[in-house]
Amino acid sequence: MDQGQPVTKVIVSARGAARWQAGHPWIYRTDVYDEPRDVAGVVAVTDRRGRHLGQALYSPRSEIRLRLLAPGLESIDATWWADRIAAAAGRRTAIPATAYRIVHAEGDGLPSLVVDRYGPYVVAQLLSAGIEQLRDDVVAGIRAALAPQGILLRNDVAIRRHEGLPLEVVPVFGTVPETVAAEEHGIRYLAAPRAGQKTGAFLDQRENRALVAAYAGPGRALDLFTYHGSFALHLARRAAAVTAVDSSGEALARGAENAALNGLTNITWREANAFDLLRELDQRDESFDTIVLDPPAFAKTKQSVPRALAGYKEINLRAMRLLAPGGVLFTCSCSYHVNRSVFAEMLAAAARDAGRRLELLALTGAGRDHPELLNVPETGYLKGMLLRAVD
Ligand SMILES: C[S@@+](CC[C@H](N)C(=O)[O-])C[C@H]1O[C@@H](n2cnc3c(N)ncnc32)[C@H](O)[C@@H]1O
């Protein structure tokens, strides 16, 4: 039998069915009446009267039991995946970069599947037990749609644990090298698909990097939590001098390599804890024309939000104090649990305590290759604000 054909039926409650009708593709364990329990994969979903609701990815061990794939009864095979992946790629033809996201999981109607392009290579992630079961068809679909030279599965993502899946990095087709040269908005950098964070680079910030560069002043710039120097590289084309800071020496070494690739010699790479360094710079009354704050997710759970907000407020307050008059601050949070309004309230409180008046230049999210659906809040996690000191 075709591995994508539904072999099993799952019956769900009216509340579960209503979620799909409202445009959200998930049905939780508590809304499932009858299920096979043992086999993950594609299932046909019905209500209690036997009315067909759609086909879904089924995860027997996850709280998110069902993820809607298709309303009909068509065969979910390699061709089905190829067609959808090709359609997602078609929506991104105008993206001016060689590395970008092709499939943003639920945001592209392909739940729990991430597909990123790095030049001729693809790095993908299978994030549910249901889709893991369809691996061969999904890989065949990627090959047919994108004709890559190699495909690597970066399945070393913690959320796979909720699905009862191992964390692993698996080459599934051809070879994907340790580093891949990429280009965005005229800046070249080396992505690290095998060992780097995410799938090898922070592709979601691409448009924000270009935006901040457009507003960057000609004086001093500070890029905190720089990783491989992505913001710093863009700032260095505008600013006289850039200080790029990260707690990882390894990440900074890659940053320095990236600067050399672009012939940029005005970046100082500094290994430090950003919290300590900000305190030190503040005590020394230093000032910068441009500051970027792109920390890791401080709130990994709902419970950790208050503590995370205290951390966000501390770094933002200090960064605001360091801004030269007319200087710009790009600040962001990639914590899903810190929503846009909570983030904005925290920033307003930080500005008040810092005694700065800040003009809101732009509210941003992830780039357009990471589509966010209004009815599926989980598709959005990154929020950014570009602010200018008006005094
Ligand atoms: C979200 S990533 C930054 C991505 C980067 N701005 C980009 O666009 O590619 C966060 C970075 O913060 C670094 N980091 C985490 N905690 C830190 C700390 N306390 N001080 C300095 N860097 C830290 C991590 O090593 C990681 O490189």
Image: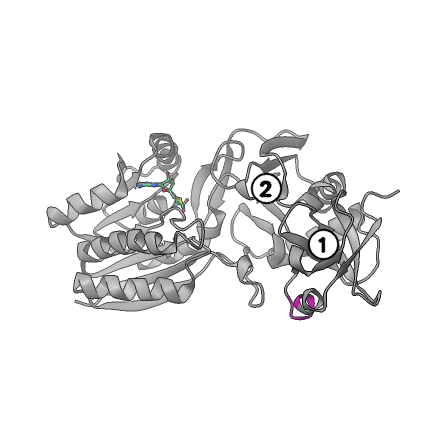
State the residue at coordinates (40%, 35%): 261
Q: Which residues are magenta?
A: 19-23
Task: Label 1: state its secondary structure.
Answer: helix
Picture coordinates of residue 355, whole percent (x, y): 16, 64
Instruction: Name the magenta segment's main secondary structure.
Output: helix
Picture coordinates of residue 263, whole percent (x, y): 35, 37
Which quadrant does the N terminus fall into? top right
Q: Which residue is mark 2?
A: 160
Which quadrant does the C terminus fall into? bottom left
**Disc 2 residue type?**
Arg
Residue 302 seen = yes
**Disc 1 residue type?**
Arg
Q: Residue furthest left?
A: 284
Task: Label 2: state its secondary structure.
Answer: helix
Picture coordinates of residue 122, whole percent (x, y): 61, 40
Determine whether 23 is above or below 207 in the image.
below
Was residue 105 drawn as part of the magenta stretch in this picture? no
Q: Residue furthest right?
A: 1
Picture coordinates of residue 157, whole percent (x, y): 54, 40
**119 horizontally vs 9: left or right:** left
Report the front residue among 361 and 132.
132
- Name the colour scheme: one colour
Image quarter for ligand 1 equals top left
Calculate the distance from the C-alpha at mark 1 to the C-alpha at mark 2. Answer: 23 Å
Q: Which residue is mark 1?
A: 84
